[in-house]
Image (cartoon, rainbow, N blue to C red):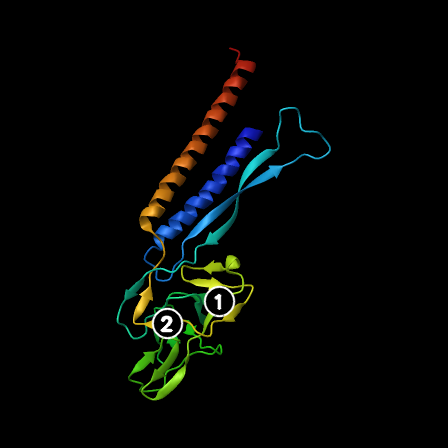
């Protein structure tokens, strides 16, 4: 493959990644606590060593999807009135216990398992401020979650929701639509802002994402047309240099 086609192909691969990220944002527009993502593009310079750049020349610049970053701006609140629906109005994440370890989430669609453990929508135990599963006492009737995350029932205090902030938000890794892994560790938030009977909606703006999707598709089409034109140009040159003989 010649240099022109290689540079264009690098842009095509990067644009595919951008389209996939935008599509994922649209798919999760109604997922509580979901935060939209964007692809960060960068230039990758192909420098040859041991020779000088020819007069009028320049380094070959390839497109590279350097990283994917996540916008952590909160979404709007939706009042549900459900006892176990909780939302965070400030910084931080709830903590849940999964088979892969502790994970973070802003999805507050909680409920009780048969043994009284507070769990998320997929059955992962919700952890308290000490990193232990929160369990309600048997036959608890009235369950209240205060603004600081304290949980109590008609039988007395139960514990406090564990709310943490990642040490390096830029290195959060998504695991599905609602769980995040914090490889650099977390710090506890001592005074979280919790709302019972509400959910935080996704911060995705569907109209904006559709605009991005159209722009991605247009860019992809442009690069594809360029590659086709370059292929036709090369084939035309070959046909002229190597004419067929009858």
Q: Is residue 18 left or right of residue 45?
A: left
Q: Which mark is residue 152?
A: none
Q: What's the residue at 56%, 64% (across, down)?
A: 184
* Figure check: 29 above or below 195: above
Res. 1 visible in picture? no
Q: Measured from the top left, where is residue 245 in percent x and y?
A: 53, 11
Q: For the N terminus, which image quadrant?
A: top right
Give the residue at mark 2. Answer: 194
Name the element at disc 1: strand
- Apparent side of residue 50 relative to residue 157 in the rendered image (left or right): right
| Of pointers 1 and 2, the one earlier in the residue sequence | 1
Q: How many marks?
A: 2
Indicate the position of residue 223 as horizontal and vertical percent values. 45, 33
Residue at image coords 37%, 71%: 194
User: Residue 177, how many percent across, how many down?
Assistant: 40, 59
Q: Residue at x 51, y 33 (%)?
A: 8
**Residue denoted by label 1:** 165
Q: Nearer the viewer, residue 216 or 89?
A: 89
- Residues at circles 1 and 2 in contact by the CB criterion of under 8 Å: no
Quadrant of res 192: bottom left
Whole-number angstrom distance, CA of label 1 to CA of label 2: 14 Å
Residue at image coords 51%, 35%: 9
């Amino acid at each position: 493959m010649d240099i022109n086609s290689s540079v264009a192909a690098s842009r095509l691969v990067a644009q595919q990644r951008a389209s996939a990220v935008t599509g994922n944002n649209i798919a999760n527009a109604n997922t509580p606590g979901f935060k939209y993502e964007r692809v960060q593009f960068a230039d990758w310079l192909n420098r040859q060593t041991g020779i000088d750049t020819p007069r009028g020349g320049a380094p070959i610049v390839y497109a590279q999807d350097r990283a994917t970053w996540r916008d952590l701006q909160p979404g709007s609140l939706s009042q549900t009135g459900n006892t176990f629906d909780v939302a965070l109005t400030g910084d931080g994440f709830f903590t849940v216990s999964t088979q892969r370890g502790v994970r973070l989430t802003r999805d507050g669609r909680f409920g009780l398992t048969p043994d009284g453990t507070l769990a998320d929508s997929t059955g992962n135990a919700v952890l308290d401020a000490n990193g232990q599963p929160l369990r309600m006492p048997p036959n608890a009737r009235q369950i209240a979650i205060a603004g600081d995350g304290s949980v109590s029932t008609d039988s007395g205090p139960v514990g406090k929701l564990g709310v943490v902030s990642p040490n390096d938000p830029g290195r959060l890794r998504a695991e599905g639509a609602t769980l995040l892994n914090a490889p650099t560790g977390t710090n506890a938030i001592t005074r979280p802002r919790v709302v019972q009977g509400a959910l935080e909606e996704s911060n995705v703006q569907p109209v904006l994402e559709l605009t991005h999707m159209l722009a991605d598709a247009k860019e992809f089409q442009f690069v594809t047309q360029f590659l086709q034109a370059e292929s036709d140009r090369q084939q035309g040159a070959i046909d002229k240099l190597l004419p067929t003989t009858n």
